[in-house]
Amino acid sequence: MLTHPTLEKLKTLQLRGMSAALEDQLRTPEIESLTFEERLGLLIDREETTRADRRVKTRLTHAKLRESASLEDIDHHARRNLDKSLLLDLASCTWIAKHHNLVITGATGVGKTYIACALAQQACRHGYKALYTRLPRLLHDLEITKGDGRYRQQLAALQRHDLLLIDDWGTMPLTDGNRRDLLEILDDRYQNRSTLITSQLPKDTWHDYLADPTLADAILDRFIHNAHTLDLRGDSMRKTKNRLTSTTTKNEA
């Protein structure tokens, strides 16, 4: 008779994991063979798991990742110069704990964004706060904040993320204001947070891309020297998938 009120109280207290676990126990006659302490332990374990899953879901929502990617789904058979040992090391998220950076370079379609999002998802699962953004949008949004007085506030918000993923580096010409914004962002994060940049441009061309020698030196000094590098090569993964789809369609026909 006390079961229903107990379930309601657990839900009122937002102990949803314990509530669901208790309902499962009530539907399982074999549970009677366990002691009170054992059953209580199962309820607590379920609550802990539920809360952990909810926190991961919240971090992933706030990360705004462009792709729903995971390390388990990365295609290791594709010939694109993927350093598996480095990827395995990055999966541990030790580089984020040490506030190191990461560069992923390669031509369009080789999977830079997917791998970057997979690593960001991994970071969220390890308890880190991540944020995805494209360089053009990031710089555009910062320009807007300069006009409405939120510039410093926005820089502070960016600095709070353990991992900042900047996609599409090098796809737009930079103004002097853009370069100074990048310096502010990377200076705030230097040795305090990790930054992941994806780019079609080889790393050794970034100085020329940044154009201004003085600002380029300052920007790269705060990013490159402790950055790991994944230099992807090979055919576009999109073209490969299209060829496979076409072949499958012909075979089915």
Image: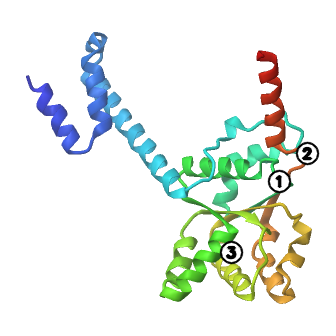
Query: Which disc is residue 234 wearing?
Result: 2
How far apart, in angstroms, are the residues tagged by discs 1 and 3? 28 Å
Percent coordinates x, y for residue 189 in the rendering: 64, 73
Q: In front here: 96 or 157?
A: 157
Q: Which residue is mark 1?
A: 108
- Tag 3's secondary structure? loop
The residue shown at (55%, 46%) is 125
Residue at x 74% of width, y 83% of height: 179
Q: Which residue is mark 3?
A: 190
> Residue 1: percent from the left, percent from the top?
8, 22
Percent of width and height locating residue 246: 81, 29
Q: Measured along the vertical axis of the image, is residue 239 above or below residue 191? A: above
The tag earlier along the polypeptide, 1 or 2, is 1
- The alpha-carbon separation of the residues under discs 1 and 2 comes to 10 Å
Q: For mark 2, does the 10 Å Cα neighbourhood hold few (<14), some (14 to 19), or many (20 or more) residues?
A: some
State the image quarter where residue 164 is shown: bottom right
Q: Amino acid at mark 1?
A: Thr
